[in-house]
Image: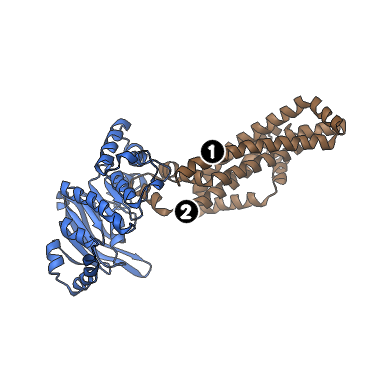
Chain colours: A brown, B blue
Amino acid sequence: MIHDFGIVWSERALLLSGLANTTILSALSAVAALLLGCILTPALMSKQRLVSWVARVFVDGMRCVPFLLFAYIVYYGFPSFGVRLDNWTSGLAALTIYNAAYMAEILRGAWAAQPREPIEAGVAFGFPELRLFRRIILPPLLLSAGPVLGNQMIQIIKDSAFLTIIALPELTHAASSIQSRHYVPFAAFITAVFLYWGLCLVIEAGVNSIGRVAEARR
Amino acid sequence: MAQSSKVLDVAGVSKRFGDVEVLSDVSFKVDKGETICVLGPSGSGKSTLLRCINWLERPDAGQIYLNGERVGINGAGIVMSDRDLSKIRTHIGMVFQHFALWPHLTVLQNLMEAPVQVQKRPKAEVHDEALALLAKVGLIEKRDAFPAKLSGGQKQRVGIARALAMRPDLLLFDEPTSALDPELVGEVLVVMRDLAREGMTMVIVTHEMGFARDAATRVLFLDRGRVVETGSPDRFFSDPETERARQFLQRYAGDTANGRR
């Protein structure tokens, strides 16, 4: 067994590049999904029926599709419509679009739980719609939803493992290459698990610091 | 039109929610420097009236003019754009029953937010003015505190200072002391009395009869969405014209005797 881990250690360059790709992929798509979610949330809350309906259909649709299938559709399905993306781009797009729906739904829930009066004060003080959302509505949402958003970022990291099926060289892909090359499944996969765990700990530290900022305002 | 001499002119405003007529044909004018107290039993439409003035509620009928300028409806007779309505609203300050401070901003930032973000005034100027306003309401030492750390009375004083930071032509108060513990009401009323003395133009929905009696230039008594009585507070409190007002005042006499101001 120790020997197996020795083999994994000898392949550390491959694992580390997988870890780096997973980190980059997750970070980029977490930021992009959150931004998209911030745009989708006012659409979900819109008083214009058509706008909120379209947003609702998208969000509910995404939440009911298994991520693996969605990744297949983006990578293998989109080329039939003439959209041919390389595995990095389609992986990033799939991860982003899919999780944007979750981000939007999380923010919508936090919004619905906010007191009405401070938002109304923004309207009464003359904030136009867009600035009202950006300056008055959104910041408390991000603070109060911080822990749940952090949770979703952990979900993004874990979802990124599926992208091994479109040959994206991320951490799971690296681990499974090592195992198929050397037949050390347990050592290769458990090492990957610990590396994922380390990434999640970083996210949790981030969530805790948001929590402290929010606590001062509560 | 003679609206230009008035800060506020409310003409024939009506509003219904479903089957309930909340306001019916309400008219009154406010001169510069006046303190109008709007009194009446709960459910009489006082808050709705206030919220119609800055179009937080859209009136079903009637007109509202601020400094002679029509609120909510543009020259072509249609509902104003968000942008135009926003511009008018910057001239009307509002103080809310539950304070409505922005929780993610410090006290000082609460005061500076709208003047900088909406009115686009220079930050340095707004900053100095905000500090002066905080000093005026006695909260300069709380400048960097978040609203959640303040008492109700302190929150409401920040709420008033925040409204003043917009340099409004008109200040609306929606039951500013109703959510406060009785012992905190006084500190807010002190600030409001000062403003009345300084000639700030204000429309105040309140249940503080003592305050209305000695700070208002005029009272407006509302019942079931109609202006039943209007006039000087002396006259209204000592010798109301209508039976409805008499009954209303009798119910409050107990509270006043018990030391509520």
Q: Which residue is mark 2?
A: A48
Place of residue B235 in the rendered image (x, y in percent of width and height, measured from the top left): 12, 65
N-term mark: 2 or 1: 2
Q: Residue at x 49, y 54 (%)?
A: A112
Quarter of the image with the N terminus of chain A in it: top right
Chain hosting mark 1: A
Disc 2 to disc 1, C-alpha distance: 37 Å
**Residue B261 percent location from the top left of the image:** 23, 60
Q: Nearer the viewer, residue B260 or B48?
A: B260
Left or right of residue B125, residue A44 in this image:
right
Disc 1 is placed on an element classified as helix
* Residue corresponding to mark 1: A209
Which quarter of the figure has residue B165? top left
Asked if B122 appears above or below A98 in the picture, the reply is above
Q: Is residue B66 left or right of residue A172?
A: left
Residue type at mark 1: give it: Ser
Q: Residue at the location (52% across, 52% down)?
A: A52
**Residue B56: numbered disc:** none
Can you see residue A166?
Answer: no
| Residue under the point 20% across and 51% down | B193
Q: Is residue B242 above or below residue A55?
A: below
Using residue A30 as the reference point, say whether residue B17 is left or right of it: left
